[in-house]
Image (cartoon, rainbow, N blue to C red):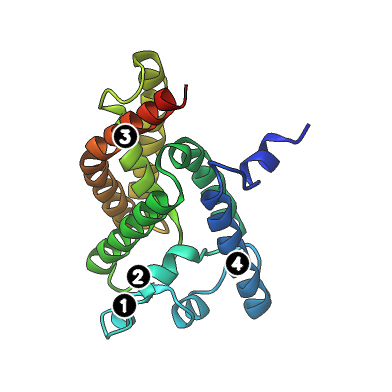
Amino acid sequence: MSSPIVQLLTPRPGYFLTPVIIYINTAIFLLFVLLTREVMWFPAQPLAIYGGNFAPLTTDGQWWRLVTSVFMHGGLLHLVFNALVLANVGLMLEPLLGKAQLLLIYLVTGIVASLTSVVFNYGAVSVGASGAIFGLYGFFLALLFSNLFRSEVRQAFLRGTLVFIGINLVLGFTMSMIDNAAHIGGLVSGAILGVIWIPIIRRQILRHQADQSGER
């Protein structure tokens, strides 16, 4: 029987896109290891040159950095932490949303997070999936405040989600290396998208139930 980590990293029906995003992030990390000869933490200069969200360059017409920076990481621990957190939230959301909707929410909240970083951290090089991950958690949080889940399930997930968000926001306010602006931008945009998506998910659930009923 495979370990929980292997299961989190194994693509399968209903949970395919999340591991693929992790693999893309890992491949880019390995490219930076070859480029910088570093593993634990990469220098800011190559991150800025090769796609990091550095506001003077981003706002100078290189808007693609809003996306590329979401798939880059500053070092090994940064990647591992984000990969594990992404796997956990993806495991909850991807079976509910499917690949296309999850990717859309990931990219939109990641871009909003990057834009927020441009505004509030103009001189810093910002990289990492955490803005998009906070977007997914904000989205999930909005769903938990609806009646899409049974009461006992909602309460269990709600406590864990609020604790995760609270601890990481507090750390972001106390540690200068953490881009809390991106976290907040992702979280808020994800919550807004979650509110918008609730009726969409309800219709999808009803359609699925009707299809199952018709097959009997």
Task: Give yes or no for contact between labels 1 and 2 (Cβ–Cβ under 8 Å).
Answer: yes
Q: Residues within 10 Å of mark 4 (few under 14, many from 20)?
A: many
Q: CA distance from mark 1 to mark 2?
A: 6 Å
Task: Give yes or no for contact between labels 3 and 4 (Cβ–Cβ under 8 Å).
Answer: no
Residue at horizontal 44%, vertical 45%? 98
Q: CA distance from mark 3 to mark 1?
A: 29 Å
Q: Which mark is residue 29?
A: 4
Residue 26 relative to residue 177: left or right? right
Q: Amino acid at mark 1?
A: Trp
User: What SS does tag 4 mark?
Assistant: helix
Query: Mark 1 sits on what residue?
Result: 63
Q: CA distance from mark 2 to mark 4?
A: 17 Å
Q: Amino acid at mark 4?
A: Phe
Q: Residue furthest bottom?
A: 60
User: What SS does tag 3 mark?
Assistant: helix
Residue 76 relative to residue 88: left or right? right
Q: Which mark is residue 141?
A: 3
Chain-order first, disc 2 or disc 4: 4
x and y percent of residue 61 in the render?
28, 85
37 or 32: which is nearer to us?
Answer: 32
Residue at horizontal 53%, vertical 41%? 14
Query: Mark 2 sits on what residue?
Result: 66
Residue 174 visible from this viewpoint: no
